[in-house]
Amino acid sequence: MSLESNYHAILQSLGEDPDREGLRDTPKRAAKAMHYLCQGYRQSLEEIVNGALFSSDTSEIVLVKNIELYSLCEHHMLPFIGKAHVAYLPKGKVLGLSKVARIVDMYARRLQIQENLSRQIAEAVQQVTGASGVAVVIEAQHMCMMMRGVEKQNSSMVTSVMLGEFHDNPATRAEFLNLIR
């Protein structure tokens, strides 16, 4: 059964008429939207990075902050929306700037929980760069908590993953946290 026919069945299950004017093309549009929102399943780290690693003598923090992200929670398939801050300590190689944001997007465009998303991004940056440390902080608002359930409109969730020097060295961790404030 195709995604489009499943959306048609969902509309019927909700008591709607999928053939009425306003809904006639909704199953097709919803299927297309879901394919777009979950395009991360059809991407790989190798494709995303595409060789954009460059020699560099810098060993100081490289930080890309306020990377907007949009994902779907795997529990309710409702959006969570926020921003990611990604830092690493290079060891001879730096990653093309846009590639950090593309890595965030690739993992965000899968059914997710924020805790796993943070770890997947950190481990991917670590794998690609061989950095001596990687730090990821994500701040997001979850529609599954805002639109249903406890309905807390002003709530947000913050997750962090610290690898290598960011985990082991309190001064490095503090510098990163200060930079994202």
Image: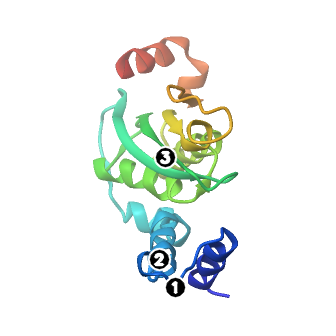
Residue placed at 56% from the left, 29% from the top? 157
Q: Give the residue type that dot 2 points to.
A: Leu
Residue with the mark numbered 1 = 19
Foreground of the two, 62 or 130? 62
Q: Quadrant of the C terminus?
A: top left
Q: Which mark is residue 39?
A: none
Q: Earlier in the sequence, mark 2 or mark 3?
A: 2
Give residue 174's position: percent from left, percent from top: 47, 13
Q: Give the residue type that dot 3 points to.
A: Val
Residue placed at 58% from the left, 52% from the top? 78
Give residue 120's position: percent from left, percent from top: 59, 48
Residue with the mark numbered 2 = 23
Residue placed at 52% from the left, 30% from the top? 153
Residue with the mark numbered 3 = 125
- Label 2 sits on a secondary structure element that is helix
Seen in the picture, residue 153 relative to 11 is either above or below; the reply is above
* Disc 2/disc 3 C-alpha distance (Å): 42 Å
